[in-house]
Amino acid sequence: MKGIQAEIYLLGIVIIWGSTFAIIKDILDQIMPFTFLAYRFFLATFILFVMFWRKIKNIDKMILKKGSLIGIFLFLGYTFQTVGLKYTTATKAGFITGLSVVLVPVISHFFIKEKINRNSVIGVILAFIGLWFLNYSSSFIFNLGDFLVLLCAISFAMHIISVGLYTKKMDYVPLVIVQLAIVFVLSLLMALVFERPEIHLSYSPNVWWSIVLTGVFATALAFYMQNRFQKYSTATKTAIIFSGEPIFSAMFAYLLLGEKAGLTAWIGGLLIILGMIVSQSKFKSMSN
C-alpha cells in the first residue's frame, strides 16, 4: 500500500511540474529569468530551512560538496528551461524537457559505466524522431528556445543521475536544502551581473503569484516529496510516472495560454513519451 501511495504522490509532483511551463511562460515578459529564479529558489530554500532547521547541523563537507554539484546541474536545468521558454512554446518545452528521462540511461552508460540495454537505444531513437516531428516546419528550423530547452533536458538528466547516486548514501533533507540554496545563490549572482534587478514590490500580482506557486509547490514541496517517496517505488515506475509531465504541460498550456499544438507536434510529443516508456521498460526475452 505504501508503494501505491508513494506513486500517487509522485504523480501529483508531475502534475505540479507540468503546470509550471505555462505559469512561467505567462510572466517572463514582466520579470527577467534569473531574477525570477532567484526569488523562486530563495522562497523554496527558506521554507525548507524553517521546516527542517534541526537538520542543518547534519550538513558536513561531503553533503556540502555533493549537494553543490547536484545544485549546479539543477541550476543549469532551470536556467536553460526558463530562458528557453522566452523563445519557444510551453507545449514544446514540456515535451523536450521530458527527453531527460530518455537521456538518463545513455549518460549513465558513459559517465558511471552502467550497461545500456536494447530498450534504451530504441527509446532514444523514438524520442529523437519525436523531437524532429515536434519541430517540423516548412523550413525545418530548430530555434534557439528549443536548443536551450534541449540543454535543459541534458542538465536535468545529470541531476537525476547525481541524485540517484548520493541520496542513497546521505541524509536527503540537508542534501535538498544545499541543492536549492546553490541554485538561489547562482541565480542571484547571474541576476546581479546580467539583469541588475531592483528590489521592489512593483511586480504585478501575476508575477508574485507565480513565484509563490513555483517556489512553494513546484520547488520546496516537489523536491522534498520526490526525495522522500521515490525510495518506495522502483526506478522504472518512477520514470514512467515522470514521463507524463509533457502531457500535463501541454494541457496547462492549452488551458492557461490557449496554445494549440498541431497534429504533427502531437505525434512528435507522443513519440517522445513512447520513447521514455520503452527506454525504462524491461521486456522478457523470447529466447531461453
Image: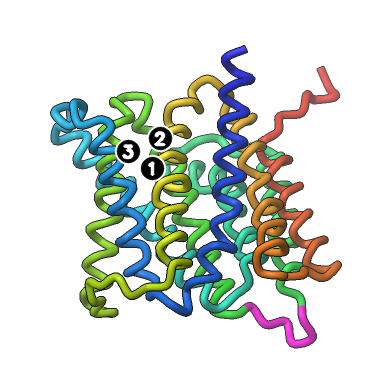
Q: For the residue marked with disc 1, what is the amino acid? A: Ala
Residues rendered magenta in the picture? 137-142
Q: Which mark is first along the chain, 2 or 3?
A: 3
- Residue at 37% across / 73% down in the picture? 203
Question: Residue 141 lies in magenta, yes or no?
Answer: yes
Residue 167 in magenta?
A: no
Residue where numbered disc 1 is placed: 220
Query: Residue 227: image x %, image y %?
Result: 43, 31
Distance, label 1 to label 3, CA atoms, is 9 Å
Report x, y in % for residue 104: 54, 45
CB contact under 8 Å: marks 1 and 2: yes
- Residue marked by disc 2: 224
Amino acid type at circle 3 is Val
Q: CA distance from mark 1 to mark 2?
A: 6 Å
Main SS category, magenta section: loop
Which quadrant of the view contains residue 13? top right
Residue that extends furthest to the bottom in the rendered view of this protein: 139
From the viewer's perspective, is 65 left or right of 76?
A: left
In front of the other: 51 or 84: 51
- Quarter that holds the N terminus: top right
Query: Measured from the top left, where is residue 275 in percent x and y?
Result: 72, 48
Q: 223 or 254: which is nearer to us?
A: 254
Q: Secondary structure at mark 3?
A: helix
Quadrant of the snapshot with the C terminus: top right
Q: Nearer the viewer, mark 3 or mark 2?
A: 2
| Residue shown at the point (30%, 62%) measured from the top left | 38
Q: Do residues under tags 3 and 2 come within 8 Å of each other at their CB atoms? A: yes
Circle 1 or circle 3, nearest the eye: 1
SS at badge 1: helix
The label shown at residue 176 is: 3
Q: Is residue 144 left or right of residue 280?
A: left
Q: Earlier in the sequence, mark 1 or mark 3?
A: 3
